Image (spheres, grey):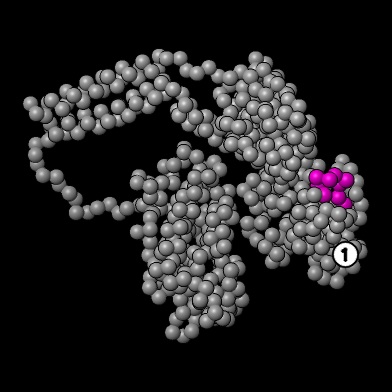
Amino acid sequence: MKRIIPLTICLMMLHFGIMAGQKGKSEPAQNPVNRVSVASDTETEILAKMWIEGFRGKYPAAEVIALPSDEFAGADILFFTGSSSDRAGERAAWKIVVGRDVIVPVMSATSPFLAVISESGISPEQFGGILTAEGTPTWGDLLNNDDLSPVTVLIPDDITVVSALSRFAQSDPALVRATSSLSSAYIPAAIKSNPQALAFCRLADITDKTGRGFIDGIQIIPVDVNNNSRSDYFEQFYADYNSFSRGVYIGKYPKALCNNIYAASATNPSPGAPSDLIRYVLVDGQPLLAGTGFTALAPGEGMIRTDALVSDQALVTAGSGGRPALRAWLWILAVIVTVTSVAYAIYRLTSSGAEEIVSSRQKPSLAFSLKSLITPAGILFDRGHAWAFMEKDGLVRIGIDDFLQHVTGSLTRLRMKDPGEIVHKGEHVVSVVQNGKQLEIKSPVSGRIVMRNEKLTADTGIMNNSPYDEGWIYAIEPDNWEKESRLLEFPGKYIDYLKEEFARIRDFLTVMPGPGDTRYAHVVLQDGGEFKDGVLEEFGPEVWEEFQEKFLERSRQ
């Protein structure tokens, strides 16, 4: 009898919870807003008008009011660029990127210097030198050789472009010079006709009619952001439009040459016309950007931002929807508690009191946490997730740490340097590859490679199973071990650093475009908040590139 009473109470709670939920469902939801006011800054005025007309065509029942610029701060939806002088948009509580204004350096595909520049790129400092040169710059100045061929520098007669170039060159706008200044519309033809020239223009000026390709005969010049005279793996995104657009999206391209276009609001856009307008701009309105000199979002980026808009609205509705929303949450809570209680009561009624049998063979955990990491004593660690250990013969063995191999999961190949090559601390030393996706690892020390672990060429799994022992990568004759070893960390301090890294990787996976949304949560996190072992294993090369740029590169800072 004592067991039946709790079961009866639980069933009654379930009944009343369902009744309350049904009552809440029967109450009408809040009506959507069918009116929206829109304003824009000077730079986006034409674009905003085109978006409004396009939106009216798709949603004829919606009322859209275009406000003048002097009423900018009072509009429901604001459109503006990141360089706008009107700060009302910057102060808005809700803001989202809806387009970009990207400035690119370009040259002819028939240029005799294209092959060399594609391999090395041109650094921001070199670009700054030719943009502010008092005399006539030469190709030798750019390529660090004796070539005295003059560089013809073309820029548009556009103050917005000149301002961006001055920020890029870290110079006063008045000091930005060019061999010739001409209308943006003539730059593609001028570049094609002069293989000795390079130009700066908007990305939209060299985009073809499809909006997803470059004009034939023109190539974007790679920017050597590392200033190391070579095109590193994470800088290799200039070959086609989609790769370049993706590189801009994830932050690989210099920010001084990329000006975002924003939509903003004092609050999250209300359901109805305000949110429908933002959704239209993010998807159907993207092709209109090219017609005004701007650049559309990367492929798929608009849909991702639309998903974020839906999520934000769901949170607002749940928090401010009044009694219906409150009843719905109470109903869900009641059902969860009740079902749990019923299950427990049934278990108590049906159990015979037999002792629980616990298997002595427990399944190994696939969770990845601080407790699962190995940090052996005596080994020194670099914040780029490499390690170093000096042997008795004076050689320093290096490899990747346990944290990184847990993140990548099973590796399929390594791209290693050859014995005899010189490596420098903080520069690329090895690429770890998994089915075509790769990460570049930086060396924790400087010196000459004496030997490499040839076992890894046949079995990369050794690195996952024994990263500090059989999974070493190189033996290096160090150049300055005494000084550089002081910059590395002992295990105790490194564990504290790894605590911060777990927080950073959680943040990275939370904001990551596409796979970071809740639909992919089962791939990322285990119950209890632990990460799944091999957390990057099921993601594509774009995410690995983002991890390189936004996580590994910043780990060393």
Q: Is residue 379 left or right of residue 364?
A: right
**What residue sits 46% from the left and 23% below the top?**
321
Outermost residue on the bottom side: it is: 393
Q: Residues within 10 Å of mark 1 (few under 14, many from 20)?
A: some
In percent of width and height, residue 320 lies at 47, 26
Q: Quadrant of the C terminus?
A: bottom right
Is residue 201 visible in the rendered image? The answer is: no
Closest to the observer, 466 or 6: 6
Q: Which residues are magenta?
A: 154-162
Is residue 360 visible in the rendered image? The answer is: yes
Closest to the observer, 324 or 556: 324
In percent of width and height, residue 209 lies at 78, 35
- Is residue 377 rendered magenta in the image? no
Q: Look at the numbered disc 1 and give the secondary structure of its residue.
A: loop
- For residue 94, above or below residue 446: above
Residue 79 location, quadrant: top right
State the residue position of label 1: 138
- For residue 292, above or below residue 276: below
Q: Is residue 423 left or right of residue 464?
A: right
In percent of width and height, residue 331 lies at 33, 24
In percent of width and height, residue 355 lies at 10, 44
**What residue sits 89% from the left and 55% below the top?**
178
- Is residue 159 rendered magenta in the image? yes
**What residue sits 17% from the left and 31% below the top?**
345
Q: Is residue 65 left or right of residue 342?
A: right
Residue 88 location, quadrant: top right
Q: Quadrant of the N terminus?
A: top left
**Label 1 sits on what residue type?**
Thr
